[in-house]
Image (spheres, helix red, strand yellow):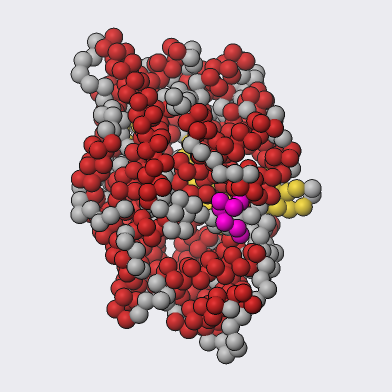
Amino acid sequence: MTNPLLADWNTPYAVAPFDKVSDEDFAPALEEALAAHNAEIDAIANNTSAPTFANTVEALEAAGEALDKVLGVFFTVAGADSNSVREDLQRAFSPKLAAHFSEISGNKALFSRVAAVWEDRENLDLTDEQARVLMLTHRGFVRAGAALEGEAEKRMKEIKARLAVLGTEFTQNLLADEREWFMPLSEDDLEGLPDFVIDAARAAGEEKGADGPVVTLSRSLIVPFLQFSPRRDLREKAFRAWEARGANGGKTDNRAIAAETLTLREERAKLLGYENFAAYKLETEMAKTPEAVQQLLMEVWEPAKRQANADAEVLTAMMREDGINGDLAPWDWRYYAEKRRAAEHDLDEAALKPYFQLDRMIEASFACANRLFGLEFKPLDVPLYHPDCRAWDVSRGGEHVAVFIGDYFARGSKRSGAWCSAMRSQAKFPEPQTPIVINVCNFAKSDPALLSYDDARTLFHEFGHALHQMLSDVTYESVSGTSVARDFVELPSQLYEHWLEVPEVLGEFATHAKTGEPMPKEMLDKVLGAATFDMGFQTVEYVASALVDLAFHDGPAPADPMAKQTEVLDKIGMPSAIRMRHATPQFAHVFSGDGYSSGYYSYMWSEVMDADAFEAFEEAGSAFDTERAKALETHILSTGGSRDAAELYVAFRGRLPGVEALLKGRGLAA
């Protein structure tokens, strides 16, 4: 029988036939797909015809279709619905894939053909997109080590293979720690918790097979527990477990993995002639240099720290009123901040949450996309990899645009966080293909499913990434959708968050789970008025993480990353009651792969643009201004990486932004 992963997918819009795929299909499918890709690469490299854009660069674009299908399915389920078999497969696949792509980037005959096309580029009459794809292809080979020879070439392959193994181990260790730990709660322990937290704790207990409610290390459960539990001892116990992920000793400890990863990254950069890994990594980003990143982060750090320290004094005074002496601790901050928010903004999260139903927030994100870009969403009945998943057919003017899949609930088989990925990206070459895009979140499951305001922002954020994929309109897949500079990729996602804050959107879609009544205007005003509440805390925990990430890579690799983390935090004066958003042993953005390594600052870099970009809509007089929406799609959402990121932003806005709009938007402006 034909392996279902490699067969033609005769399903609606060629969505993967998840109901026919078993874990036993992945390994043989990968072997066959790798062999097919190798044959395609050999044919390109050994072509006896003179190198041309068509027979070399376009041929590379067309190669690997079977491999894309297999990996698109595998990495989707490995991240969102893992099991022991899939974890074993991931450990086996990582070095194999690293070796495969190292062989391609190190193929001398192939590189010589790419280099020949590159040298002849002025005579080829290429379109702007073709010229961009050629530049990126050539640069990718050079940065991967294609020009290396002898021992340097051999060592580069070894480093890549080892880094792939380490990234997989880091991710699986973190998932194991998050999956294994939970704290049972007695009925007395539930006192003071709002119903939505109790419901989520009971649902988590059922998922864990416990006798009653539990607190897990899922952010969507532990954060509200830390906000609302009056039991300081339980808050401390939960927080310490959350903070200790990846640093508990034993086989799931990530500290040695982080140290080895940083050492190998530095060696990799130096093999390529760079001073350090940050210099190598940032060369292709908008920021260009570590100095530019450091400058941005410090411009935001000082006003954020000032605000956080002022807030800490207020929260400490509140703690004293409760008869608690000593210093404000990290497990105290969210609890007293929530009490302060209720007092100062008369905003009760428990009263607010019923207005943020998951289904209504999904509708809101769709409605905004419809008003801005004319997209329509119709439920699509196709087999998916988990019962919690759902799918929609996305169309415009009656024409199919994309398939969108949502997987929203936390579970033990899913890694933490939220992300967007494309199981298939948009392209017109070699054949037209529409994207299949998936948003994965970790919201607490209840009936009905209720979100916090931050959860709703996460939903809009990830859907902004999805729009970047769905509205892509380029020829070549390598520059499709989110295939852009890392510090540009967060612009569409963070920009889309602003539409959640538009009063008419909340007025229509923030309806009560039981009564169906819209959120009262008085509450709506309070929600929007509290939008920058506790922003000192949020900014400090994020910027601290970004500064530590940069310090890890901008200079010699630290032998002890934990000591380096402490050194950086001491130097910048980290407030004692706030922790990094992602401490080193759980910093998956940086250590599960190269994606955000030396690049966690990207969210802040993109926020400088998103704050400025939304001002363009405000200046036009409407968040749904037709002309601005068209410009956003034309210059940013549809163009992918087909043009330089700075050029795209200037085309949309007329100029590059400064940090002022960001500070104003976060309520940190002096």
Q: Nearer the viewer, residue 299 or 174?
A: 299
- Quarter of the image with the C terminus is top left
The image position of residue 515, as x and y in percent, is: 63, 18
Foreground of the two, 317 or 407? 317
| One can see residue 19 in this view | no
Asked if the stretch drawn in magenta spans residue 646, the answer is yes
Q: Position of residue 367 (x, y in %)?
A: 69, 36
Q: Which residues are magenta?
A: 642-648
Residue name at image x 64 percent, y 36 percent:
616
Residue 539 in sight from this viewpoint? yes
Reply yes or no: does residue 405 show up in magenta.
no
Q: Residue at x 31, y 66 (%)?
A: 270
Q: Is residue 614 left or right of residue 94?
A: right
Q: Is residue 522 above or below residue 394?
A: above
Residue 45 left/right relative to 283: right
| Left or right placement of residue 517 versus residue 459 in this view | right
